[in-house]
Amino acid sequence: MSTMNPDISLSSEIPDSEPERQYYYIEKARRHVADKAKELGRPLTFCVTTFGCQMNARDSEKLKGILGRIGYEEAEEDKADFVIFNTCTVRENANTRVYGRLGQLKPIKQKNPHMMIGLCGCMMQETEVVEKLKKSYRFVDLIFGTHNIYKFAELIVSCFESGGMVIDIWNDTDKIVEDLPNERKYAFKSGVNIMFGCNNFCSYCIVPYVRGRERSRAPKAITREIRQLVADGVTEVMLLGQNVNSYGKTLDAPITFAALLEEIEKIEGLERIRFMTSHPKDLSDELIEVMGRSRKICRHLHLPVQSGSTDILKKMNRHYTKEQYLELVRKIRLAVPDISLTTDIIVGFPGETEEDFQETLDVVRKVRYDSAFTFLYSKRSGTPAAAMEDQVPEDVAKDRFDRLLSEVQKIAREVCAVHEGSVQRALVESVSEHDSTLVTGRLSNNLLVHFPGTEDMIGTYADVRLSECRGFYYIGSLNAGR
């Protein structure tokens, strides 16, 4: 859905600059796809499957945008001529899932030799993964990583013209290529990358090794993209980065994340601003002040704590203490009293004692999160934590996990219920999956509400009375006074 569409003749030389070079290859790929479609007597189809985080989901929209531009139509995986897995590698079992899915595709490809299979994303940044694919999965056509997704059309051309496995993995990059096609999942809301990579090196995390060092997009490029999205019907954006709070530090003219938010807030027609993920060590007083006075920033903050034990946080290389985190929460609630706080928590990190775990429960009870993503620690090869001594026995970690989950859910039900009876503004996102007479709306605090409505309401805002809390969502009705 890019506004840029250069008219590039294939008789001309290949452009040196980006994105013109990629539009040249988009046109070339389009001709290859048209030739193959003519040969088969039908349009070519694709399926992109996304594993992992919202950064990956946003990357998949870019893949889909290019595939649509070159002539592919979307289809189910078992019927697609081009299957792409956009992979995650945060946990090793994610790799296992991808290998299993590849095994299922092998017989399908044997029956359809023209079929292409592509792999991209974080998992492809691991050398041992690529070596395994080269040795045991020779039927894969295309392998590329996280740093050169903008070259997708160029790589597709290579696949058509080489007839063999195409591998293009970069160890790192400082390049950011703008203005390429993308296909949004929703017409009315969109993710917007504001930065790429991560400099934090939490001891349990593989992300900095596969996503590279932090690099921020220019603020003018970000605001230009958002204005284009608003002109195309978007009213809510989600600003994406591995650590949005450190945005702007790598720019020639540094700018804070808070200052960027103030610029985005000025964009007419934009109703809501969300962002994730926020690292506690970089969440500034300036940002809290901006959130407190903002009319558009949603009343929701995802603030991963990971552990309530200062000792474990130090081992995790998180650069804050339990006390500093709780003070941060105090400041946020003072500035934004109706804020919804959510978090990530890891249980069973190496060296975690029962006393450490009780510190985590203490944080949960004091903060009272609306919800929490809870994880059992699992070794991730290539991270410092995997080599640490005092790995917690599985049965002990599982017991702690169950106790934590019970506490999180009990508190979350209580916290969410406080809004019962109030009238809140909801962005209608879909018809309810369970009852076609209801629509599903998302509140500013990120909770969902189901209420009577019709499909034509999707993408609009409605004032909804929250009649009944059902734990983690509401049943509501249109406010009579709307």
Image (cartoon, helix red, strand yellow):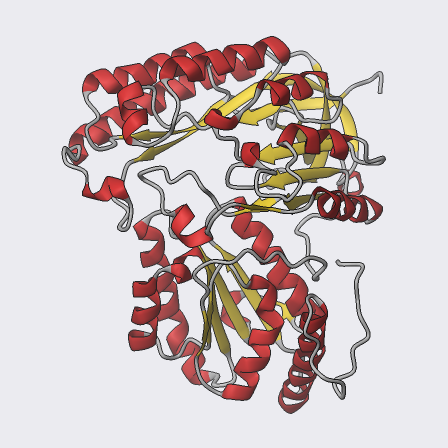
Is residue 451 visible in this depiction of the protein? no
> Please, is residue 467 above or below residue 45 in the view?
above
On the rendered structure, is 349 left or right of 148?
left
Locate residue 15, reporting x and y percent. Answer: 71, 76
On the rendered structure, is 28 left or right of 235?
left
> Please, is residue 137 above or below residue 355 in the view?
below
Residue found 19% across the figure and 28% down from its top = 351
Locate residue 368, reporting x and y percent. Answer: 46, 14
Q: Give residue 399's quadrant in the image.
A: top left
| Residue extending furthest toward the front | 252
Residue found 43% across the figure and 17% down from its top = 325
* Screen quadrant of the N terminus: bottom right
Q: Give residue 23's quadrant in the image.
A: bottom right
Residue found 78% across the figure and 77% down from its top = 8
* Screen quadrant of the C terminus: top right
On the rendered structure, is 12 left or right of 79?
right
Residue found 57% across the figure and 55% down from its top = 59
Locate residue 474, reporting x and y percent. Answer: 60, 23
Closer to the camera in the image, 194 or 480: 194
Locate residue 276, reporting x and y percent. Answer: 56, 35
How many tags in the picture? 0
Is residue 428 visible in this depiction of the protein? yes
On the rendered structure, is 248 left or right of 424?
left
| Residue extending furthest toward the bottom | 39
Closer to the camera in the image, 355 or 317: 317
